Structure formats: C-alpha cells, structure tokens
C-alpha cells in the first residue's frame, strides 16, 4: 500500500529534523504543508514567494535528497505559494511552481498582477547612484563620541560598540535597546550605524522608524509590490528599526518584518531595534516576533545620575564652544531629573535667554529659566535628613548608623544612606564619609557600588531602595 502525501512529508521531516538546527527547522520547515502526491511529484504549500526562494536557495539539495529517499530517483518537488489577494473576502491566491524553476499559475481567479522577476525597487535610493548605494538615513551627529557613558546606559553602549565592530558576528543579534522618552535610544542606534559605516564602508546600513516601515509596506501593498518591499529589505547588512512598539497596530507589516527578520538573521546580518519598553512587555506584537527579539540582547536605558548629567552638559558645552559658571552647570544637573532631551533643552533655553537679554549666565538667570522645566522649586536636601529617613524606614537607631559594626541590617542601612546621599546631595564623597563617623571616600564608593549590585540581584532590596528614593524626592519638593 502506497504512503499518503502526509506520511511521505512526515517521513521527510523526521530526516530533516536530525540534520537542520532546531531553530532553522522551526522557521523554515514547520510552516510547510503537504498538498498532494501525483506521479512521484510531491506538492508542498509555502506561505510566501520569499519562503519559496529561500528554500530553493538554501535547502533545495537537502529537500531533493530526502524526497528521493522516500519516492525514488523520479521524485520531484512542486511548490504551492499562498499569495495575499488584497481582499479578505476572496480566498488566498495560489501559484504553483515546479521545483525545476518553470512557473505555472494555477489559479484562474487571480485578479491582480504578480511581479516576480522585476528589479527590486529601492525606497531609499540616492538619485543617480546604483541600486545598493542607498542613503542610510543616519544623522552624522549621532556618534559614540557624543554619547556619554554612565551607569544608566553602560551595558547598552558597550554592547552597541561590540555590535558596530562586528555586525552580525556576535550573540547580540538582535540588539534591542529600550527605555523611556528622551533617554538616547535613537542616538545610540544611529551611533552604531555610523560606526559600522566608518569601519566597513561597503556594508549596507539602513535606519528607519517603524512608522516609515509601515507606511512603505502600505504603499507597496497598494501597488501589488509587497515582494519588492521584502526583497529590498533583505539586501540590508545592518538594519536599524526605531520604535518597534508601533508594530502593535500593523498586523500585516509584522508578517513582512517576520520574513525580513528571518532572512537577515539566517544570513548573518545585524538587526538593531529600539522600543519604549522591554520585549516581554510589548503588547499587540506577534509572539513569534517577540520570541525572536529575545534571541539576542535586550539592554535598557535609565535616567542618568547626577555625575552623568554633568558629563553630558560638559560635552555639549565643549562641542558648542560654550562656557558657563560651574555652579550653574551643577544647578541644571541637579534640578533636571527626567531625561537627556530635557536636560539639553534647559541648556538651550538658558543660552537663548542670555543672548536675548544680553546678560551673563549666572545662577539667578538659571533659576529663572528652569522654572519652566522644574515643576516646583526644590529644597536643598541634606545628608542628615536622608540619614533620619533611612533610620526611620529600617527602624535603626541613628547612632548605630555611625558605629563600626558588621551587623548586616546596620551595614546595609548605612550603605543605602551613602548611596542616596551621593545621588540627592551636592556633597563630595569625602564630605559624605565624614557624616558617617569619619569614613573616607573609598568607603562611600564601595557602598554605592554594593547597593547597585544588590539592586540587580535582590528584588526586595531594590524595592526598599526605590521606595526610599521616592521619600527623598518628595522631601525635596
């Protein structure tokens, strides 16, 4: 008794499963459905034209050998491709393609032209240049030199530098950078692109927002040119997609990006994605895409601390050839606590007011200008005030906080107090140490690092620190 086409294909998959990597098998073979078996010709249904081309390019030899093992030397393979008709009321259009490459259309209801071999249209072409000499859509001002490293972004920045030096050749693929508004996601993503172009001028780099990607997809859909759209993006060596959270409202665009992602990743190309939240928290995005986003590294960006804000302002002033009293720089850094964009906005506003009023920048002018950026005037918080808050929170006697003891609860309370004093006051490390029984600055540094490390590994400890941070912030209002 002859085997059915289902059993033939199932036997083929059993063989292929032992040869191909598990993830490749899941991506390229599980979606295939056997359709029919007629005169040693097995017809399999694949989701798209791109899917068919990828199988023909990468797995045709494996498919041929496996099929001949099941059906003999006369075995042949035929593909049935599902093509979106653009009308949800109609059944999907099918296109049958023999494995030898000759195409024959099997659906008489095809009501729109299907372009297969036309040249791929380039939506980012530079007029007069060749197809692959595309505009990478990068801002030359966004570089690693202008991206200050701090505790808030260290992992993401260093991962980005590694990716830029070896795109597609690290385990950080994709690299997903996420964080709130104005924290430098776009700057970092484009810095990677600019560094790649600097080190590898022949690499094809493209930065595109998710909204532009979606709009291009819609335009190509109207022109029945989705294949052209997908094929173009498959030519990119380093693809940077900004704000992937907006994919949540574009289901079909997600399908196209899924095909593009698979092709680029399998081909050793680099993907860099940014988002306002971690991949695990993205809503409305297909699970199969989310699982791929988690293949590489997800690195978050946080609000910069006081020292990092000082460094950002110093670099901005240096690049723009500006000078400003140190007390003014410190005042801006201390009072702007939202994001980098607002920090730079405060600096620009201050310079504008200085120019318009023809007066020197001083602390008085800074306080006047920053009223538009600070919700309410802040009080100067002291180390003593922070010490009292921590003692009350942990029910620890104030004098014990200053004693030399190794009791865990006392040591942690002291370390947290030093950490908060460094974050919320303008005192030097030496001054902070003196408030804890005359300890030196190295003890303060060690305490702050210990708190950061414990926040990364101990959830309850982190919650306590965050709660105390809120108390200190409220006290400063």
Image: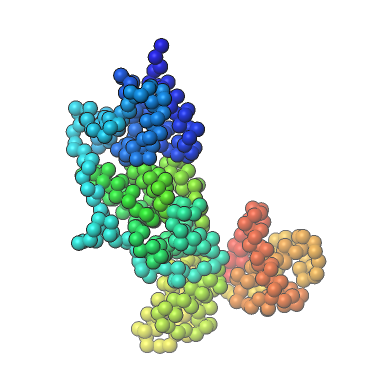
Left or right for 33, reference 297: left
Residue nearer the viewer, 21 or 326: 21
Left or right for 120, reference 35: left
Rendering coords of residue 264 (x, y %): 39, 48
Quadrant position of the C terminus in the picture: bottom right
Q: Quadrant of residue 187?
A: bottom left
Q: Name the residue at the front extreme.
A: 73
The answer to whether one can see residue 90 in this image is yes
* Image coloring type: rainbow
**Could you tell me which residue is drawn at 43 percent across and 43 percent down?**
289
Q: Quadrant of residue 428?
A: bottom right
Rendering coords of residue 424 (x, y %): 60, 71
Q: Name the residue at the bottom extreme.
A: 359
Residue nearer the viewer, 268 or 472: 268
Number of disc labels: 0
Please tell me whether residue 90 is drawn above or below residue 290 in the rendered image: above
**Could you tell me which residue is drawn at 42 percent across and 50 percent down?**
268
**Could you tell me which residue is drawn at 30 percent across and 28 percent down?**
78
Please tell me whether residue 195 is drawn above or below residue 273 in the rendered image: below
Rendering coords of residue 345 (x, y %): 41, 72
Quadrant position of the N terminus in the picture: top left
Q: Quadrant of residue 410?
A: bottom right
The answer to whether one can see residue 87 in this image is no
Rendering coords of residue 161 (x, y %): 48, 63
**Could you tell me which residue is drawn at 41 percent across and 23 percent down?**
70
Residue nearer the viewer, 238 or 147: 238
């Amino acid at each position: 008794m002859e085997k059915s086409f289902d059993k033939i294909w199932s036997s083929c998959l059993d063989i292929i499963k032992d040869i191909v990597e598990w993830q490749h098998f899941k991506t390229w073979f599980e979606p295939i459905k056997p359709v029919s078996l007629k005169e040693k010709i097995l017809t399999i249904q694949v989701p798209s034209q791109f899917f068919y081309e990828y199988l023909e390019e990468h797995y045709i030899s494996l498919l041929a050998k496996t099929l001949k093992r099941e059906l003999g030397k006369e075995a042949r393979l035929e593909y049935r491709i599902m093509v979106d008709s653009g009308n949800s009321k109609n059944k999907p259009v099918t296109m049958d393609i023999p494995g030898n490459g000759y195409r024959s259309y099997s659906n008489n209801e095809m009501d729109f032209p299907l372009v297969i071999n036309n040249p791929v249209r380039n939506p980012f072409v530079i007029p007069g240049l060749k197809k692959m000499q595309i505009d990478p859509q990068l801002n030359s001002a966004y570089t690693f030199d202008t991206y200050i490293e701090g505790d808030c972004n260290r992992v993401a920045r260093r991962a980005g530098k590694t990716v830029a030096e070896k795109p597609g050749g690290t385990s950080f693929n994709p690299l997903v950078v996420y964080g709130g508004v104005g924290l430098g996601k776009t700057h970092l993503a484009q810095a990677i692109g600019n560094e790649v172009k600097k080190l590898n001028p022949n690499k094809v780099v493209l930065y595109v927002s998710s909204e532009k990607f979606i709009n291009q997809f819609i335009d190509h859909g109207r022109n029945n040119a989705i294949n052209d759209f997908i094929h173009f993006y498959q030519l990119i060596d380093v693809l940077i997609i900004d704000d992937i959270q907006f994919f949540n409202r574009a289901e079909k665009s997600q399908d196209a990006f899924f095909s593009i992602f698979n092709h680029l990743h399998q081909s050793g190309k680099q993907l860099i994605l940014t988002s306002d939240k971690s991949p695990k928290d993205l809503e409305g995005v297909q699970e199969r895409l989310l699982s791929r986003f988690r293949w590489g590294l997800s690195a978050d960006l946080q609000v910069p601390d006081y020292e990092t804000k000082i460094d950002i302002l110093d670099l901005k002033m240096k690049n723009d050839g500006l000078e400003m009293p140190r007390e003014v720089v410190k005042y801006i850094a201390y009072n702007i606590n939202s994001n980098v964009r607002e920090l730079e906005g405060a600096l620009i506003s201050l310079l504008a007011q200085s120019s318009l009023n023809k007066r020197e920048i001083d602390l008085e002018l800074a306080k006047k200008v920053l009223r538009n950026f600070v919700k309410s005037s802040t009080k100067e918080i002291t180390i003593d005030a922070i010490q009292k808050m921590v003692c009350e929170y942990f029910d620890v006697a104030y004098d014990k906080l200053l004693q030399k003891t190794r009791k865990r609860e006392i040591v942690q309370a002291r370390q947290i107090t030093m950490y908060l004093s460094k974050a919320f006051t303008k005192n030097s490390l030496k001054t902070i140490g003196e408030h804890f029984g005359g300890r030196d600055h190295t003890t303060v540094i060690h305490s702050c690092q210990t708190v950061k490390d414990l926040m990364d590994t101990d959830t309850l400890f982190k919650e306590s620190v965050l709660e105390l941070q809120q108390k200190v912030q409220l006290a400063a209002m």
